[in-house]
């Protein structure tokens, strides 16, 4: 159920970000389950999650409607997240990492290396990366020793595509998704190096760049039939 739920969430986020599910469109459990060829349970859970993320709104009666989300909405939320996570990284580097924190971060790097070293990924492996990515970011936030950062991030997470958990994947172009994720993983290596060497300013800069890189990469690499940028957001950063 967990893997099915993650795939459903990633698919629905992708459909909303690309406009396949248009702003204001009403969606319901049964037709969506049939469309994605899954049971109603992961659809029901996904709808609730997407409502919390600010992508769906409860419709009168039953069902949901797709919330209008602009490029500026997403960019603003991503920038705030980058500032907060950059601050967390700087403070973690300045405080120094405990042995446990260092080991947890390094374990995430090793696990990611195993996924990307072969030169390609499948959807199930991106789900694995989604989980280790969350652990990596959470470990840095905890290592900052600043509880206010976690509180601020939890509030920002309710904005569209702001959360580290907001995964959207284009299953029709896994080669491009491999490049996107593997680049993000190399940034993990860079921030880890800065953290273990106590380089606060460098760690902060990398984390801020990390939060924004995927958004820019999506804008640059994806085009619709008219040649205009088509927004597909992969909140890996």
Image (spheres, rainbow, N blue to C red):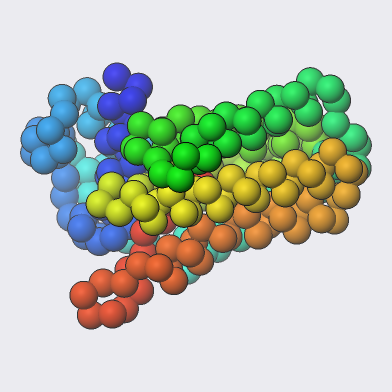
Q: Is residue 81 above or below residue 88?
A: below
Frontmost residue, 104 versus 139: 104
- At x 90%, y 35%, the residue is 96
The residue depicted at 28 percent of the width and 80 percent of the height is 227
Q: Is residue 125 left or right of residue 196?
A: left
Position of 18 compared to 188: left or right? left
Q: Quadrant of residue 88?
A: top right
Q: Nearer the viewer, residue 234 or 67?
A: 234
Residue 159 vs 126, above or below: the answer is below
Q: Quadrant of residue 201?
A: bottom right
Whether residue 79 is situated above or below residue 199 in the rendered picture: below
Relative side of 125 to 113, left or right: left
Residue 79 x %, y %: 61, 60
For residue 7, side relative to residue 176 (left or right): left
Q: Position of residue 215 (x, y in %)?
A: 49, 61
Give whichever of 166, 68 is nearer the camera: 166
* Residue that protrudes farthest toward the front in the picture: 118
């Amino acid at each position: 159920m967990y893997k099915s739920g993650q795939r459903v969430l990633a698919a629905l986020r992708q459909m909303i970000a690309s406009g396949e599910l248009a702003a204001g469109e009403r969606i319901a459990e049964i037709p969506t389950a049939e469309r994605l060829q899954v049971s109603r349970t992961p659809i029901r859970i996904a709808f609730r999650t997407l409502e919390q993320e600010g992508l769906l709104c409860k419709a009168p009666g039953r069902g949901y409607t797709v919330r209008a989300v602009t490029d500026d909405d997403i960019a603003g939320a991503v920038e705030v997240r980058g500032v907060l996570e950059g601050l967390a990284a700087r403070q973690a580097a300045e405080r120094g990492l405990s042995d446990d924190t260092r080991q947890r971060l390094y374990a995430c790097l090793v696990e990611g290396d195993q996924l990307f070293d072969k030169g390609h990924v499948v959807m199930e492996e991106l789900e694995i990366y989604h989980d280790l990515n969350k652990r990596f970011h959470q470990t840095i936030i905890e290592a900052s020793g600043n509880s206010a950062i976690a509180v601020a991030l939890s509030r920002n997470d309710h904005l569209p595509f702001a959360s580290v958990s907001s995964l959207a994947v284009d299953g029709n172009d896994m080669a491009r998704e491999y490049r996107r994720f593997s680049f993000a993983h190399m940034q993990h290596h860079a921030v880890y190096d800065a953290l273990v060497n106590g380089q606060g300013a460098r760690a902060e800069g990398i984390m801020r760049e990390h939060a924004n890189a995927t958004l820019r990469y999506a804008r640059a690499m994806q085009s619709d039939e008219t040649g205009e940028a088509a927004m597909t957001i992969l909140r890996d950063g």
